[in-house]
Amino acid sequence: MSVPALRRAIRRRRPRLVCIDCFDTLLLRGADHEEDRIRRLGAAAETALAAKGLEIPRGAFAATRIAASHAVYRSAARTGIEGRHAQMLTLQCLALGIDPVWATLLEKVEIEQESRDLRPNRPLADLLRECRRQGVPVVAVSDMYLSGDAIGRLLEAAGVADCVDRVYASSDHGTSKRQGDLFRLVLAAEGVPAGECLHAGDCRVADFEIPRSRGVAAVRIPRRLVGAIRALRRLSRRFQGVPAHA
């Protein structure tokens, strides 16, 4: 389905609340492998730290970021509590042998890098603005280690902050779309029954199957070409002996 399909669903269902996924839906990434994105981030972070008089070995940022991410995700899988960016950055600082106070700088560098990598889904943004003009609130709902405040800054940088009323991030609330409880939390906070909410996003499970299982109407907006390219790159890296997931 597509943005026109979402428009038709909104007209047909007349929801009291529209929920929208952020990454790869309202904010679009390229088809780069996650490892390539982390390498770019690493180069920017190493430059920023060097400017403050902190020299770290080339490539150390990327390696420690991958390790910290895996540690946080393993903890989340064990406890059921979503991981947070601050946890990753603190672990990374410790692994790099620098004071965790530098996590603030690393967060700033990452938001700036994300702002460069992301672009807005303009047709979708226009539709969401139209919803808001007609009095239908729109909230962004994201399974992401970044905080809602950080996601808001990315929306602002992309020129689409005016498309949403609020941002709900899994990292802020300790639960996720994929678990289903983030939808329950959003509905309670917004005071809207499940049957009067419409959600849209790119992920088959988190943005389509799970909300429907909770009584929320859902429209999937997949990025098939980008998904195919990413799958081919993962396969290529696997054959080359490079880890498929960063």
Image: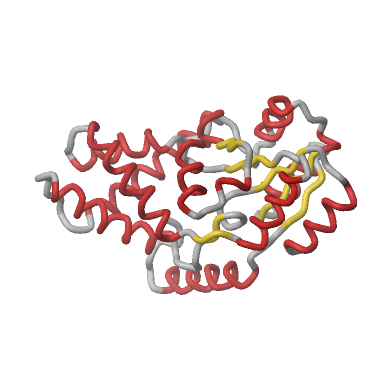
In the image shown, does 45 or 94 lie closer to the viewer?
45
Percent of width and height locating residue 76:
50, 35
Tell me what residue is drawn at x 56 percent, y 28 percent.
Answer: 173
Q: Is residue 88 left or right of residue 120?
A: left
The answer to whether residue 73 of the structure is visible from this angle is no
Residue extending furthest front? 133
With respect to residue 31, does 48 lie above or below? above
Residue 198 locus on image (x, y percent):
78, 44
Question: In which quarter of the view is residue 212 placed?
Answer: top right
Q: Is residue 202 left or right of residue 69?
A: right
Q: Is residue 35 above or below residue 209?
A: below
Is residue 77 positioned above or below 235 on the image? above
Q: Residue furthest left?
A: 53
Q: Quadrant of the N terminus?
A: bottom right
Badge count: 0
x and y, in percent, of residue 233 in the image:
48, 71
Frontmost residue, 45 versus 57: 45
For the point 38% across and 48% down, the residue is 111
Location of residue 93 in the rendering, given as x and y in whole percent from the top left corner = 24, 38
**Residue at 67% from the left image edge and 57% from the top image edge:** 126
Name the side, left or right, on which 122 lies relative to 68.
Answer: right
User: How does the figure colour the protein chain or chains?
Assistant: secondary structure
Question: Quarter holding the C terminus?
Answer: bottom left
